[in-house]
Amino acid sequence: MNAERVIYGREGDELFCPNCGEGLERTPEKDKNHESADLAPVLIRTILTTVLAYKCPKCGKYHYGDAPAEVFEAGLTGFSLMSMIVLFKVVVNATMRKVQTLLQAAFGHNLSLGFLSEISDKKPNSFSAGTNGI
């Protein structure tokens, strides 16, 4: 599946090392990538977020573009997909294999069992608090 790509970098004054003031150089090999999946109105979409890396040639430290915190707070998945997985797991009492089958049938997208297990095991704390009474 093709991922929607979002890139966060630095601009203007951010292109100077905050430690020593030297101009930063782009270092693509150190970019940070974060992939997440979420439900779109009709399908599951994958978003690949890249936070661009810059290295100070003087002090050798790496600095990164600023991505919004919510990009990483949801872990591997967005809130809509997480809600559906929790619904299947908690309310329907489905196994991960059954969750995989239900998502495949509903959206035509086959998420791996490993991916689904990681989502289930590492759901964000803010989301976990909302499922305590279920």
Image (cartoon, rainbow, N blue to C red):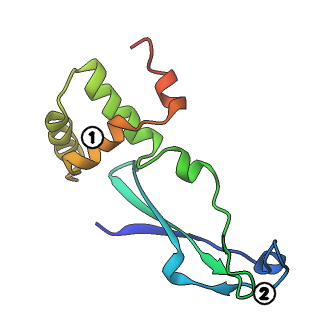
Residue 26 sits in quarter: bottom right
Residue lying furthest front in this view? 59
Q: Of the numbered discs in the image, which one, if any, rests on residue 117? A: 1
Instruction: Name the residue: 23% across, 21% down.
Output: 92
Q: Earlier in the sequence, mark 1 or mark 2?
A: 2
Q: Is residue 15 above or below residue 48?
A: below
* Residue 67 picture location, percent across and down: 63, 61
Q: Report the amino acid beneath label 2.
A: Gly
Q: Of the numbered discs in the image, which one, if any, rests on residue 70? A: none
* Residue 57 picture location, percent across and down: 70, 88
Q: Report the amino acid beneath label 1.
A: Ser
* Residue 83 picture location, percent across and down: 40, 33
Quadrant of the rendering where the N terminus is positioned: bottom left
Left/right placement of residue 50 relative to residue 112 reads: right
Residue 45 sits in quarter: bottom left
Mark 1 vs mark 2: give the one in front. Answer: 2
Q: Nearer the viewer, residue 26 or 68?
A: 26
Q: Is residue 39 above or below residue 33?
A: above
Left/right placement of residue 117 relative to residue 15 reads: left
Q: Which residue is labeled 2 in the image?
A: 23
Instruction: Name the residue: 32% across, 52% down.
Output: 43
Q: Secondary structure at mark 1?
A: helix
Gap in Å between the C-alphas at discs 1 and 2? Answer: 43 Å
